[in-house]
Image (spheres, coloured by chain):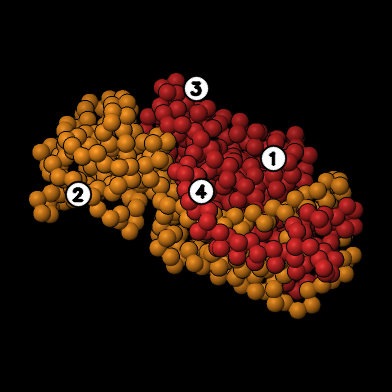
Chain colours: A red, B orange
């Protein structure tokens, strides 16, 4: 009789050889599926019992924000894993490596500009960047693409223009600030970063699979892993949104330096989709335009949900260093562009 | 989550949730309506991937042929085997969290944001005044119906003071204020509840104590425009307009609890 316990933990591999296998030993697999069904049945059955206990307004608000972020990110995550599956199935790694120039000074800005072609928000670009790096693209170029895509694609720029009517310099500022930040981070990473660790299931699909199988294998793995970490990020963002008290922002609005740091941190904490953040920035009327540009440039590049996803995709060490570097560079780029434009 | 069938089941669960949310009116508590078609499409993709994973024949290859890091030197370079193993098990376990939004939906059934969130979140606040607003709509039954956010921005920004002497009808929920009275509040959502901004108007002249989150339809007029017309900023502390109420009616909550037009778009 096999236990109905949490199979993934008990089945943890201990050797590199075991690590390399995607599927567990025969006999184990059904437990996971049954556990899932059991959880669902318990959840539905327990609804009447616990709904009273779980009805505090703080918990309800937390739940609303958590569910909202998860639901809203889902279509974009699916878009991301479809692209990453297509890359794995249709683009041979050798082509990917040859398509981009070898010289980082050329490849990194090119990857940044290529980000303009992906009309998604930041949840989509993390699995794509991981797949590009796994397929042989230089890590710096993949990271630059990951930072640029959610910030400078047409949908985001149009949303920004709509949110700031009569202020086209906000759109230009956002484009230039985000592109500058992502290119600078990419170039710095070629110097200070040690490549890009590629976590477990980010490896290429097994050789010898057909195109469809390779596609569905990659899309499935990427969705499950990136999605799991997305949920971690959504929990963190919901917690911070409920915990940060009202009125904190108004107190710092008039001190320029404090305001810039506060809006940069707010972007990290709120974890708003890059297609909606311009509207929030527009409503932060007590802040200067350049402080709000900092909010717009930092948000798509660094936020708690992205940090969680990057920790899952690239490892904990990466998630400690990379977002810190990106935050500093993004604030600097936004201030520079803001000083020039706004 | 390591075997193919479990992965498929998980995808079916999440995909099924997306399909349900793509059609349910419940979804409007969390995201804006334009996300729903996207949810339907992504749900269909996930269900297809899930069915493919559960139903595909010949899924089992010998473990040794699965992934051979040595065959892909570029991808495996510089990676410690132990670290990779750790990351892999982490990735396996983390996928279980995907059932959490589904569990929260079923167990808690989170309501749309209400007065608790309104009290925790900084309200939309005023900045420099200016800009002209489009003309008011025609009154219906003696009052001009308008969204709370339109009322707010006319009160705070409109240099032409278009609300002066105009009887309006506003809908929102009661949110207790510090002075013992209440605010009429409503959230304006752009994309999802995480980015919703609260719009608030202080209600004056209602003798009845309203319980928090009671939805109200209020007819009345703006006490005084806050738009100064000199391009100077309004102190955010003074930026809540007063609504002098002369008729307050408790109502059922509207189908969509959120407004979607802040600043007129």
Q: In the picture, which quadrant includes the N terminus of chain A? A: bottom right
Of the image marks 1 and 4, the number of the one nearer the N terminus: 4
Element on which disc 2 rests: strand
Q: Is residue A183 left or right of residue A15?
A: left
Of the image marks 1 and 3, the number of the one nearer the N terminus: 3
* Mark toward the viewer: 1 or 2: 2
Element on which disc 3 rests: helix
Q: Is residue A272 left or right of residue B238?
A: right
Element on which disc 1 rests: helix
> Pointer 2: what residue?
B249
Q: CA distance from mark 3 to mark 2?
A: 47 Å
**In the rendering, at what x and y percent does residue A234 appear?**
57, 47
Q: Is residue B229 left or right of residue B92?
A: left
Residue A146 drawn above or below residue A188: below
Q: CA distance from mark 2 to mark 4?
A: 32 Å
Q: Are marks 2 and 4 on the same chain?
A: no
Residue at point 44%, 59% (across, down): B27
Q: Which mark is residue A319?
A: 1
Q: CA distance from mark 1 to mark 4?
A: 36 Å
Q: Residue farthest to the bottom?
A: B57
Rate crowding at label 1 as few (under 14), some (14 to 19) or many (20 or more) other CA atoms within 10 Å.
some
Residue at point 53%, 43% (across, down): A238
* Mark toward the viewer: 3 or 2: 2
Q: Are marks 3 and 2 on the same chain?
A: no
Tell me the quarter of the picture where residue B45 sits. Answer: bottom right
> Pointer 4: what residue?
A53
* Mark toward the viewer: 4 or 3: 4
Write down the chain letter for disc 4: A
Residue A85 drawn above or below residue A311: below
> Pointer 3: what residue?
A257
């Amino acid at each position: 009789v096999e236990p109905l316990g949490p199979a993934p933990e008990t089945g943890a591999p201990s050797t590199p050889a075991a690590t390399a296998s995607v599927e567990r030993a025969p006999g184990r697999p059904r437990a996971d599926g049954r556990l899932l069904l059991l959880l669902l049945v318990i959840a539905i059955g327990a609804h009447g019992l616990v709904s009273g206990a779980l009805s505090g307004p703080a918990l309800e608000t937390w739940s609303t924000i958590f569910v909202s972020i998860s639901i809203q990110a889902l279509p974009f995550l699916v878009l991301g894993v479809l692209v990453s599956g297509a890359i794995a199935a249709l683009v041979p790694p050798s082509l990917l490596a040859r398509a981009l120039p070898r010289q980082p000074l050329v490849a990194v800005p090119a990857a940044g500009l290529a980000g303009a072609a992906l009309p998604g928000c930041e949840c989509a670009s993390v699995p794509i960047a991981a797949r590009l790096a796994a397929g042989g693209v230089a890590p710096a170029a993949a990271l630059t693409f990951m930072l640029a895509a959610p910030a400078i694609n047409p949908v985001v720029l149009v949303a920004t223009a709509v949110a700031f009517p009569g202020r086209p310099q906000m759109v230009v500022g956002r484009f230039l600030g985000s592109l500058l930040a992502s290119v600078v981070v990419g170039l710095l990473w070629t110097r200070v970063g040690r490549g890009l660790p590629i976590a477990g299931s980010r490896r290429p699909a097994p050789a010898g699979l057909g195109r469809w199988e390779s596609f569905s294998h990659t899309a499935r793995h990427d969705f499950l892993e990136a999605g799991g970490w997305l949920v971690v990020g959504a929990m963190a963002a919901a917690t911070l949104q409920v915990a940060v008290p009202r009125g904190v922002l108004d107190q710092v609005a008039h001190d320029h330096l404090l305001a810039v740091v506060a809006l940069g941190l707010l972007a990290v904490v709120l974890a708003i989709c890059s297609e909606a953040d311009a509207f929030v920035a527009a409503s932060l009327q007590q802040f200067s335009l350049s402080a709000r540009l900092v909010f717009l440039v930092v948000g798509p590049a660094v936020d708690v949900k992205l940090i969680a996803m990057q920790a899952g995709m690239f490892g904990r060490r990466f998630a400690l260093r990379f977002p810190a570097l990106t935050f500093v560079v993004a604030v600097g780029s936004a201030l520079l562009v803001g000083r020039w434009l706004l | 989550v390591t075997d193919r069938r479990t992965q498929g089941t998980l995808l079916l669960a999440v995909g099924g949730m997306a399909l349900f949310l793509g059609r349910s009116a419940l979804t409007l508590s969390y995201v804006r309506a334009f996300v729903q078609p996207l949810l339907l499409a992504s749900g269909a993709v996930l269900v297809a991937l899930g069915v493919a994973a559960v139903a595909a024949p010949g899924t089992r290859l010998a473990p040794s042929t699965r992934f051979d890091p040595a065959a892909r030197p570029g991808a495996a370079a510089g990676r410690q085997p132990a670290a990779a193993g750790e990351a892999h098990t982490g990735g396996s376990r983390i996928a279980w969290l995907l059932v959490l939004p589904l569990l929260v939906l079923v167990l808690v059934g989170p309501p749309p944001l209400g007065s608790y969130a309104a009290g925790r979140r900084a309200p939309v606040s005023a900045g420099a005044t200016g800009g002209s607003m489009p003309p008011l709509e025609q009154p219906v039954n003696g009052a001009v119906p308008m969204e709370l956010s339109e009322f707010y921005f006319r009160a705070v920004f409109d240099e032409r003071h278009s609300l002066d002497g105009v009887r309006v009808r506003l809908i929102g929920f009661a949110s207790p204020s510090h002075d013992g009275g209440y605010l009429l509040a409503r959230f304006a959502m752009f994309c999802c509840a995480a980015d919703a901004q609260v719009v608030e108007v202080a209600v004056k002249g209602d003798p009845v104590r309203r319980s928090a989150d009671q939805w109200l339809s209020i007819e009345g007029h703006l006490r005084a425009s806050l738009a100064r017309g000199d391009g100077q900023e309004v102190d955010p502390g003074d930026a809540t307009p007063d609504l002098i109420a002369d008729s307050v009616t408790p109502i059922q909550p509207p189908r969509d609890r959120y407004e979607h037009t802040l600043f007129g778009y």
